[in-house]
Amino acid sequence: MKPFFPCLVILVASTGHVLAGSRVFQPNLSAAHLDRRSWVFDKERKLQTTWPNRQIRYCFENDEAADAIREPLEEAHTLWQRSGLGAEFTIAEVGEQECQEHPQSTLLVQWTGDEGKMATSIGLLNHNRPHMLLTTSIHMGMLDQVLNFAHELGHAWGLMHEHQNPNFWSSGIIENAKGGTVFGPENHGNWRCENLKDYKEQFGIHNPVRNPGYNNGFGPSTSPADMCKSYEYAATNGFTAGDYLPMPSHHGIGGSEGKTGDDVDWDSIMLSRNRS
Ligand SMILES: [Zn+2]
């Protein structure tokens, strides 16, 4: 099955190589490549679908949110279009009535304040209302409000973090990995879990670690170290490693089957940053 999304927008960050500042990955700069890649949800899982008519219909949680983030969100969409997104992909703010009457087909955009977090549902969910949480902080992600919002819009379109494609991760201790030569401890230590900003905090809180193999995550626990090598463990426990570690291959469809640095779009806006 081909993903609906034709290509991934290339954004050349002002810092040049987008991961150059990351303390988590230490990529080989010579591997930078400008081909377009993507890692898109797999419709066959029936958890999500694409937006009808390629239009994200959204509303703000309240007037305060609208005042704070309406403009940069529109600018983020413009940025996508300037970067190659087809004109047929549109966003449309809808009124309160549609927002209330059609919760499953409208994206609820919430403002988490000046120091809040960012998170967005991947695509249009089949069973729940999709959400987008946006902060006006510029001290996280790409350190730029419009770029950060554009990243979140990418999630709403159905894009997942490219580095979570399991093809890029070395087989070894990391779960779901498929023998890639880019990320993972076996690739020159190219996974610095201990550098994640919430590493110390998470390892202090989660003892025992919630086990994703059991109902609601409660069941026999194992070592906290699992949270650094398992996407499922990290995600279940709310650890940011869940934004980096490889997902099970059936979760997504990659733009290529490649496993090397040449197969990663290093300039993608859909690579997570960790500049705490
Ligand atoms: Zn993201």
Image (cartoon, grey):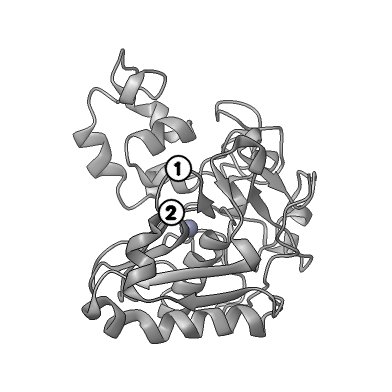
Residue sitting at x 25%, y 67%: 112
Q: Compared with residue 13, is residue 20 higher up or lower down, i.e. above or below?
A: above
The picture places residue 144, in percent across and down from the top left corner, at 42, 79
The answer to whether residue 209 is visible is yes
Q: In the image shown, does 94 or 65 lie closer to the viewer?
A: 94
Tell me if mark 2 has few (under 14), some (14-19) or many (20+) residues whose alpha carbon lies within 10 angstroms of its own.
Answer: some
The answer to whether residue 118 is visible is no
Q: In the image shown, does 162 or 71 lie closer to the viewer?
A: 71
- Please tell me whether mark 2 sits on a helix, a strand or a loop: helix
Of pointers 1 and 2, the one earlier in the residue sequence: 2
Q: Are marks 1 and 2 in contact (CB under 8 Å)?
A: yes
The picture places residue 138, in percent across and down from the top left corner, at 34, 76
Q: Compared with residue 245, is residue 109 higher up or lower down, i.e. above or below?
A: below
| Residue 173, image quadrant | top right
Q: In the image shown, does 259 or 145 lie closer to the viewer?
A: 145
Instruction: Please state which amino acid type lies under the numbered disc 2.
Output: Gln
The picture places residue 205, in percent across and down from the top left corner, at 19, 35
- Please tell me whether mark 1 sits on a helix, a strand or a loop: loop
User: Where, quadrant-wise, is the C terminus in this rendering?
Assistant: bottom left
Instruction: Please state which amino acid type lies under the numbered disc 1.
Output: His
Q: To which residue does mark 2 refer?
A: 104
Q: To which residue does mark 1 refer?
A: 127
Instruction: Report, in whole angstroms, how far the alpha carbon at label 1 lies from the one at label 2.
Output: 7 Å
The picture places residue 66, in percent across and down from the top left corner, at 30, 80
Extreme residue toward the top, this view: 220
Tag on residue 161? none
Q: In the displayed structure, does residue 139 sit left or right of residue 22?
A: left
Q: In the displayed structure, does residue 85 sit left or right of residue 113?
A: right
